[in-house]
Amino acid sequence: MTDTPYLAIGNEELGAPVSEGDIVAVTIDGTRHEGAVKFGDRIVDGERIKSNTIGAINLPDGRVILVAISGRLLTGVDLVRKASD
């Protein structure tokens, strides 16, 4: 049997609504990082469809950090400004 990693997140761990391009901040290892949220696509019948299921930011060192689920910020992630501002 192989172990399959998974991540479980409850509704109480989700915060404010967030959209693609919004700037968010998260502190990792004592350093505050800001970045624009990017959501992935889902593929249905071979066609890419925009989705807000998983949102992340890219750090300057190449790491990708999960910041949103289903269009809502995770606990500990702060909305700095909306993309439309």
Image: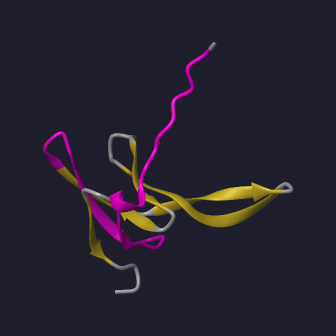
Image quarter hosting the N terminus:
top right
Q: Which residues are magenta?
A: 2-31
Nearest the viewer among 62 and 29 is 29
- Is residue 36 visible in the rendered image? The answer is no
Q: Position of residue 5 (x, y in %)?
A: 51, 29
Image quarter hosting the C terminus:
bottom left
Q: Position of residue 58 (x, y in %)?
A: 40, 51
Residue, far left: 30
| Residue drawn at 34 percent across, 57 percent down | 13
Q: Tag count in the figure?
A: 0
Magenta stretch holds residue 26: yes
Left or right: residue 1 compared with residue 30? right
| Residue drawn at 48 percent across, 68 percent down | 71
- Is residue 52 visible in the rendered image? The answer is yes
Which of the 4 image quarters holds residue 63? top left
Nearest the viewer among 7 and 38 is 7
Q: Position of residue 81 (x, y in %)?
A: 29, 77
Magenta stretch holds residue 18: yes
Q: Position of residue 46 (x, y in %)?
A: 84, 54
| Residue drawn at 43 percent across, 50 percent down | 9
Which of the 4 image quarters holds residue 82? bottom left
Which of the 4 image quarters holds residue 41? bottom right
Residue, far bottom: 85
